[in-house]
Structure formats: C-alpha cells, structure tokens
Image (cartoon, helix red, strand yellow):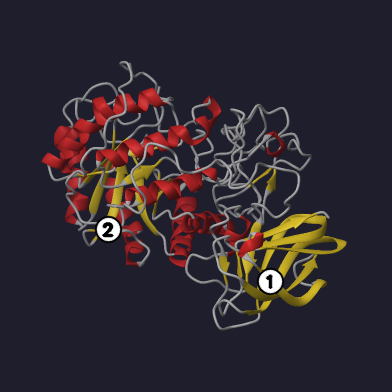
Amino acid sequence: MVLSRRTLLSSVALSPAAALLEPAAPARAASPVGDVVGKISVGYQGWFACPGDGAPIGGWWHWSRDRFQPPSPSNTTIVSWPDMRDFTRSYPTAYSNLGDGRPAALFSSYDQQTVDTHFNWMQTYGIDTAALQRFNPFGDEGPTRDAMAQKVRGAAERTGRKVYIMYDVTSWTNMQSELKTDWTTKMAAHTASAAYAKQNGKPVVCIWGFGFNDDGRPFAPAQCLDVVNWFKAQGCYVIGGVPTYWREGRNDSRPGFLDVYHAFNMLSPWMVGRTGDLAGLDWFYTNVNTADQADCNAHGIDYQPCVLPGDLSSGHRRHGDFYWRSLYNMIRLGAQGLYVSMFDEFNEGNQIAKTAETAASVPAGSGIRALDEDGTFCSADYYLRITTDGGRMLKGQIALTAVRPTQPTTGTGPGPSDLARGRAATASGSVQVYVPRNAVDGDAGSYWESTNHAFPQWIQVDLGAAVTVGRAVLKLPPSWGARTQTLAISGSTNGSTFTALSGAAGRTFDPGSGNTVTVSFPASAVRYLRVTATGNTGWPAGQLSALEAYAG
C-alpha cells in the first residue's frame, strides 16, 4: 500500500513518557533569520475544488472520493468541517443540513476570495510563511495547480506573507527529470515576486518524500541526491521533508539515505500520525528530536521540525494542550524554524484554519467532530490564535512556557447573543495590523483602527443573513484612556443601501465603565451592520476593539 502524508502512520513504539525537562539552550543556527529560519511556516494544500468554480480539474476535488459526485457521509475524504462564516461563496453538498438548520456547504480553493481569506487569516494571526504543496503536475491536476500557484502568489503579495513551493514526490514516477522541468519552465518564475520566500538570499524550495520506506517513493539515493544538488546549483535554498527516523535509517526511513539528508540546507522531519498524546510528544522530544537537532548542528543544517495541532477526528487535541506541547517542545529544543502541519488539511483533521465550533455547525448525523468534542468550547479561530502565541514564543516576544497562554475562547463561550462574533468584517480602511477582523474576534486587546486623518471612516460586519438587531455594543481596550468618538450606526440587507439605526452622536468610552458603549435602537432586519466614525478626541481615526450585535 502506498503511504502518503494523508495516511496516518502509527507504527512507533513509545517508551514511558519522559518528564518535562528544563528549557534547553538555544541551538546554534546554521543560518540567520530569514523567511523560514526564525519563522512560523504552514503547509498550505489549496487543493479543494467544487463544480462551477471554474477549476480545470472539475468536480469535488479532494472533498469526495468520487469527485464527480457531491460529498456526503458515504462519499467523502474529509474528517473535519470548516467554519464557513468568512467566505462569500459556497457550494451545497449532499450532506444533511447543519445542526442549526443551515445548508451544508463548502468552499472552493479555486475561488480567489477563499485564498484571500486564508491569507488574511495568516496576516491577522501572525503566520509568516506558507508552503504551497505541489504534487505531480504532469497529469490532469497540472493546470489547476498552476492556477493555484498564481492565486496564492497574489494573495501573499497583498497580505505581506511569504510563500514557497513544496514539491511532494509521492507516486511521481519520473520526478528526477520532471521536477527540474517544472521548476525551470513554470515555478522558478514566481521567485521574481517580493512575496516569494528567501533564505540566505536564495529562493526557498522544499522537496517532500525522499527516503520514505514505502512503495509510493521507491527512489534510489543517487536519484534523490542528484535532484537536491541540482536545485542547489540553481541557487536555491533547499528544504527536505524527510522521514521521522531519517537520522537512524529505520522505521519510516530507508537505510542508505544519510548523504541525501545531509545535502539539504534545512531538514523538516514528518510527525503526522506518530503520536496522539502529550506523553508521546515528550518521548519524541527526548529520544528523537534532541539528537536530530544535534546532528543538524554538527552538519551546518537548519532544523525545522513539524508541529501539529493533533487529529481532531481522533480526539488528540485536548482543547489546545497537544498543539501547545508540540510548539513548546520544539522551541525549547532551539529549532531554527517551525513547520505547522497543516493549515487547511480537513482531510486528516489536523488543520489550524477556522473549524466548526459545535454540533450546530457540522452536518447533522455525520459524526464529524467539532472543536468542542471534548466538552470545552473553542472558538473557530482558536488554533490560529495558538499559532500566534507559538510564533511569539519562537521569536522571544513572550517567555518560553510549558503552560498554554491561549484560552479556548476570548469571551464567555458560544452564548446565544453576539450575532457579530467571528463574522466577516470589512472597513473603509485600516492601518498596520489593526484590521477589521479584530473587532469581531472576541479579544478585548486587539482592535481595528481606521486610516488616520481621513474622516469619515467606517467598519461593518456581515451577519451572514438578515437577522433582527436592536442593540450594538461598542468597545475599546479596557486599559485605554477615556475618549469620545462621534459614531453613527446604520444597517443594510444588501450591503449597498444603508438605513440609519442611530444617528451620529458623541459616544464616550470611559475606562471606569470598561470602555464600553451600548447603543439601542428600534429592532430592524439587518445583514450588514455599519458603524461610521467622524471624530475621535483620543486619536485621529476610528477605533473599536469590539463591534457586537444583539437582537434587543
């Protein structure tokens, strides 16, 4: 049987878990900080298509086993369900309606808005770099994968993220020649973009799969070494996605590949499916990762271990504790960079992208687990927020800690009330990282700030459908000093024609009352709720840390 990265390998015998050790001294970096060293990188599949999206591949690519039939409980390749609230276009499936009665619909990666939304999340949550997965493009997948590379490049350019190509050689029979052809005729052109990841001044490329001990990657060491050296001769910084036991040449690694592994500039050993609990992560830290780091140090190779949130479908996540332990162990080890597996891998259940929170947001009767599967409510963006904190810890912006600082929710739980929480937010303008999404993320410390010195400015939230709204709650970070903003509230059912709900008035934000302003108005059917700012005594811009909407 061909074992791909989408197959969970669990043939690892673990010894009793090691106790948590004292933080290790930082490992010697072979390279200075760049776009992968010192950074959080995520694996980005971008491989979902739906009928009608225009993708050349056609059908329900990667959503269904039979891609020419809609996904359903008996025809599916996924084990987790995405949170769909930020997407403007979706495609109905053959699943039953969601638990709350909404149609069960999915996104297409081929829609530019989907890619833009994903990269907006990366920007919001401090994800530095995305590794675009590229499987054999010389078959029917080629045109779609070529188009996805262009879409991802554009999204990275617009959001200030970095991206690099990550080749997967699984079942790629002629990879030795075709990798070179694909790079020189197609992918190398993307390195001209300012968004293409560079390390040590060289464009980054990753090759995943050399040395794995399975029928899908039967390549000889000489073939693989030729490819690595060819890419280095093209002036590339080459990452190897290698087996877990690469250094020892056993279990998932073929023997005789050590020269191949040592030819890479950076090594990123695979970890998906190797363990599902904290004790297992600690065992690998003690018995595998520590020696891996030492070997890389001795050979001048950067180390980029795989960190992962855990398989949601198998109950591995422990509401974030598994992911945090994975991050903590590799950061205390002194790894030069981290590779998160994966961003959008709903097929394996190890995605960090926004995911259905409760049974109300997954198809009824499907058996798909939501984020609250262990009884703890977690916001849809929880694993993105953990990634934010993990990145800050990697960069020394917060102290190294074994205790997860990220809370499963930034509020009090799912609640029946705030209609705006987690919904898509837009604005007339924003500055730096103070984007509209911050006003609906439930985090009291993050905030939206409009373009400065350019009143009027507005922020609005799409509630997803026309609902009854009779009260808005506006907030600023509780530690801020008092100020008065001149704000008006309006609503719309179509996003273009707005009706006044509460006229422009001075709204005083006072830290003595939590910097909170409540505005009530006659209950109205509203899909788009807009707040317009025309003045601010504290700063020359509109500012909100929360825009909440309630029925009354």
Whichever of callouts 1 and 2 sits on the residue coming sooner in the sequence is 2
Residue 425 vs residue 110, the one in the foreground? 425
Q: Residue 508 carries which label?
A: 1
Q: How far from the left and from the top, in percent, is residue 136?
A: 39, 43
Q: Cβ–Cβ below 8 Å for labels 1 and 2?
A: no
Q: How far from the left and from the top, in percent, is residue 113?
A: 58, 59
Q: How far apart are marks 1 and 2 (CA)?
A: 45 Å
The residue at the point 64 percent across, 48 percent down is 84
- Nearest to the eye among marks 1 and 2: give it: 1
Q: How far from the left and from the top, in percent, is residue 66?
A: 60, 33
For residue 264, side relative to residue 384 (left or right): left
Residue 1 vs residue 34, the one in the foreground? 34
The residue at the point 65 percent across, 75 percent down is 484
Look at label 2 and name its amino acid: Gly
For residue 306, side relative to residue 152 (left or right): left
- Vertical position of residue 258 compared to residue 421: above or below: above
Quarter the C terminus occupies: bottom right
Give the residue at the far front of this rendering: 512
Q: How far from the left and from the top, in percent, is residue 108?
A: 59, 49
For residue 87, side relative to residue 524 (left or right): left
Look at label 1 and name its amino acid: Thr
Quarter the N terminus occupies: top left
Residue under label 2: 34
The residue at the point 38 percent across, 64 percent down is 195
Task: Name the quadrant containing residue 327.
Answer: top left
Q: Badge 2: how crowded within 10 Å, few (<14), some, or many (20+)? A: some
- Vertical position of residue 538 compared to residue 547: above or below: below
